[in-house]
Image: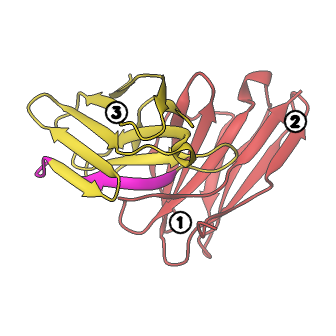
Chain colours: A red, B yellow
């Protein structure tokens, strides 16, 4: 157990739907990062939050959004889902910005 | 824009042999270079990391070699074991910003 908890582990949904992925960071870590992992794109950075505020944005689609709550857990919202959104979504947390700890991921399948 | 290039994509090594994975980067402002190990169904886990003021770092059977002038770094796994079979990612970051990952290397250790 890495200390970073992601739920759900698996998610199957239809095109056009909206889903929410949840992440609880490791105790004491203020930064949360979201990454998308697909077979042909490797690990792609989506977005970072630090203590509730958005800190950095990667190639995150406009259909995707995220937030970090006062208790530091984070949610990634994916809407108007397309087949191409099927991927593994990882959350990572860090206290210093170096040495991320990753969760086990959410496997999203869009059918 | 891929800022960290990793090779090879896949690698097969005999048990007891040396596994070598290479990465090259472009951004000379990168100041932290970690390697992550990922097993199927799991999130990436930090294996070993190096800063650019050091040319080599060793932890057990794992060694990072760093060549600042060539903007290259590599992971060496000595006495490779079947349990080392996994996907390995190099990464880099500048000033504790987002980690940029290489495309990954699928390592298979044959018994």
Residue A78 against residue B14 in the figure, above or below = below
- Number of callouts: 3
Q: Position of residue A93 (x, y in %)?
A: 51, 62
When asked about the image quadrant of residue A85, the answer is top right
Query: Are discs 3 and 2 located on one and the same chain?
Result: no
Disc nearest the viewer among 1 and 3: 3
Q: Nearer the viewer, residue B58 or A81?
A: B58
Q: Name the residue under label 1.
A: A52
**Residue B104 seen in this snapshot:** no
When asked about the image quadrant of residue B23, the answer is top left
Residue A17's disc number: 2
Q: How far apart are marks 1 and 2 (CA)?
A: 26 Å
Q: Nearer the viewer, residue B52 or A109?
A: B52
Q: Where is residue A81 in the image (x, y as percent from the top left)?
A: 79, 31
Q: Is residue A59 left or right of residue A7?
A: left
Query: Are discs 1 and 3 located on one and the same chain?
Result: no
The secondary element bearing badge 3 is classed as strand
**Residue A64 seen in this snapshot:** yes
**Residue drawn at the location 31% of the way across and 46% of the way down:** B93
Q: Position of residue B69 (x, y in %)?
A: 8, 32
Q: How far apart are marks 3 and 2 (CA)?
A: 43 Å
Q: Mark 3 points at which residue?
A: B20
Q: Distance between the residues labelled 1 and 3?
A: 40 Å
Q: Nearer the viewer, residue A30 or A51?
A: A30
The secondary element bearing badge 1 is classed as loop
Disc nearest the viewer among 3 and 2: 3
Q: Which chain is disc 1 placed on?
A: A
Stretch in magenta: B45-55
Image quarter in which the N terminus of chain A is found: bottom right
Badge 3 crowding class, 10 Å Cα cut-off, few under 14, some 14 to 19, many 20 or more, is: some
């Amino acid at each position: 157990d890495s200390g970073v908890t992601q739920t759900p582990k698996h998610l199957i949904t239809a095109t056009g739907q909206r889903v929410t992925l949840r992440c609880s960071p490791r105790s004491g870590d203020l930064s949360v990062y979201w990454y998308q992992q697909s077979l042909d794109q490797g690990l792609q950075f989506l977005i970072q939050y630090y203590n509730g505020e958005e800190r950095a944005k990667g190639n995150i689609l406009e259909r995707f959004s995220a937030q970090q709550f006062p208790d530091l857990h984070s949610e990634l919202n994916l809407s108007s889902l397309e087949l191409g959104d099927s991927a593994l979504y990882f959350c990572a947390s860090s206290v210093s910005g170096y040495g991320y700890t990753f969760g086990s991921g959410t496997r999203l399948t869009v059918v | 824009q891929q800022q960290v290039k990793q090779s090879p994509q896949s690698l097969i090594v005999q048990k007891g042999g040396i596994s070598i994975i290479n990465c090259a980067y472009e951004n000379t402002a990168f100041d932290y270079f970690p390697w992550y190990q990922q097993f199927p169904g799991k999130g990436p886990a930090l294996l070993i990391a190096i800063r650019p003021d050091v040319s080599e770092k060793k932890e057990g059977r794992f060694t990072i070699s760093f060549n600042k002038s060539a903007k290259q770094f590599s992971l060496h796994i000595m006495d490779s074991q079947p349990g080392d079979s996994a996907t390995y990612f190099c990464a880099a970051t500048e000033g504790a910003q987002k980690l940029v990952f290489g495309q990954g290397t699928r390592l298979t250790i044959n018994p």
